[in-house]
Amino acid sequence: MARKTPLSGNTDVLVDANIFIAVGEPSNPRFVQFRRAVQQAGVVLQLPQRVIGEIGGRETDRVQTALTEGWAEIIDAPDPTDGDAIAASDIARRTIATVTGTPEHTVEKADTILAGLAVQYATDRSTAGVIVLTDDKPARAGIQNAVTAQGFAGTIEVYGLADIMEVTRLKPRPSGRGYSRQLLF
Amino acid sequence: MKDLPETPLRPDGGSSALGTPPRDMMNEETLRPELLAENAGLETLVTLLTHPALARVYIYICYWGPVSPPEITESLDLSKSTAYTYVDRLVDLGLVERDESVRPQQLTAEPVLLVEPHAPIIITPTILHAFALQAVDEEIEYFVDRHGIGTLVAAVRGAGLHYAGTMTQRMVASEIDVRDTEAMMVIYALEPALIVGRDHDPYFEQLFPDVSDEMELPTFDARETTPARPEED
């Protein structure tokens, strides 16, 4: 299942906190694989303080490693002020509320702000495009719908971790004899 | 039981106190000491819920039985003596049946189900599996240390709803009252329990009556054929 990575050096890549949670600690093979995918693409991940700030405690290590090694940076992006960007966040919120069947006020702002930031980035910056990386499916649907509705479908793309690397929760056994049912235990 | 306050009755005869079980659920017959003594279920469940490593062996037998002790030793990476100790314990608790008419002996286990809608409490094999993962997954162990078993049960339910697309990870976090990233972490860590539970837990639908068919999870077979990438461990 080799994939052509959508990441490239001339795109801005905005990353949600769940990506860093999904890849595990720096010693985890998934983290190693993720770092390789990012570095090979020559990308520096943009971590909005607003969403990545949730990461703390025992999970701090993974973000810190990425920052220290230079393949990620924290951006202190203000809340979008641009009309299109605000509209994008609103559409994302409404979409998430609809697909999850919950009231709009229960949708967390951190899930919708990526849509607004992506639109703001696409408008303000001269890069070839913007990629939003989030592993939360309803959130992804919301962001996707928002950027499409605002006419950014060609410049902003939304991906999950599985789109840039092969993902598995399973831990290879020490014997390295492959995955089988015991690895689900 | 003089100190039990009288529950106000509604005109329709129901109780107006939230969460108060109907009075007729237990009666003299069901409360007979002889009957209570026969039901070892409580002790069994308490034992499983306080011993993740034991629960892990039980769930393995329950899902994959009939299995032999050597298979358990191999699959769960246990020493032979540890595996036999756990199996003996599970047989003593009445959770595992041992067939010694064949060599090697074959073990089977009935799935457990405890549903107490008034508490509310639900324990199914999927829940026990999630709990058993503490023995091998430090993220789940950390989660239970910090938030307790009740919140883990809630997290299993939340993870299922998330994979079914009806909740974002952050909504799960706010519903079960943990930090966003803790919810994300436990949702990923619980994936194996949902993957196998969906296929092997006969009570999976009791846990997810609404979304049991809607979860987007990798299928077990797809995982099995994924090549291993051994890293230094």
Image (spheres, rainbow, N blue to C red):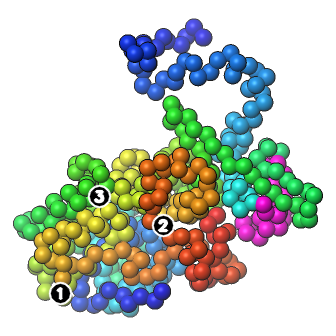
Q: Nearer the viewer, residue B113 or A129?
A: B113
Q: Could you tell me if the residues under marks 3 and 1 are in contact, i.e. CB atoms within 8 Å?
A: no
The residue that disc 3 covers is A99
Question: Where's residue A184, x and y in %?
Answer: 61, 66
Q: Are marks 3 and 1 on the same chain?
A: yes
- Horizontally, is B212 left or right of A19 in the view? right
The residue that disc 2 covers is B217
Task: Mark 1 vs mark 2: give the one in front.
Answer: 2
- Tag on residue A127? 1
**Magenta stretch holds residue B89:** yes
Q: Residue lying furthest left in this view?
A: A83
**Magenta stretch holds residue B78:** yes
Look at the image and give the residue range highlighted in magenta.
Answer: B66-91
Mark 2, Cα crowd under 10 Å, few <14 / some 14-19 / many 20+, is some
> Residue at coordinates 68% horizontally, 15% vertically from top-left?
B28
- Whole-angstrom CA distance, mark 3 to mark 2, is 18 Å
Q: Are marks 1 and 2 on the same chain?
A: no
Position above or below: B22 against A50: above
- Tag on residue B199? none
Q: Secondary structure at mark 3?
A: helix
- Whole-angstrom CA distance, mark 1 to mark 2, is 35 Å
Which of the two labelled residues, at mark 3 and mark 1, occupies the earlier sequence position? 3
Q: Specify whether residue B106 is in view.
A: yes
Q: Chain of mark 1?
A: A
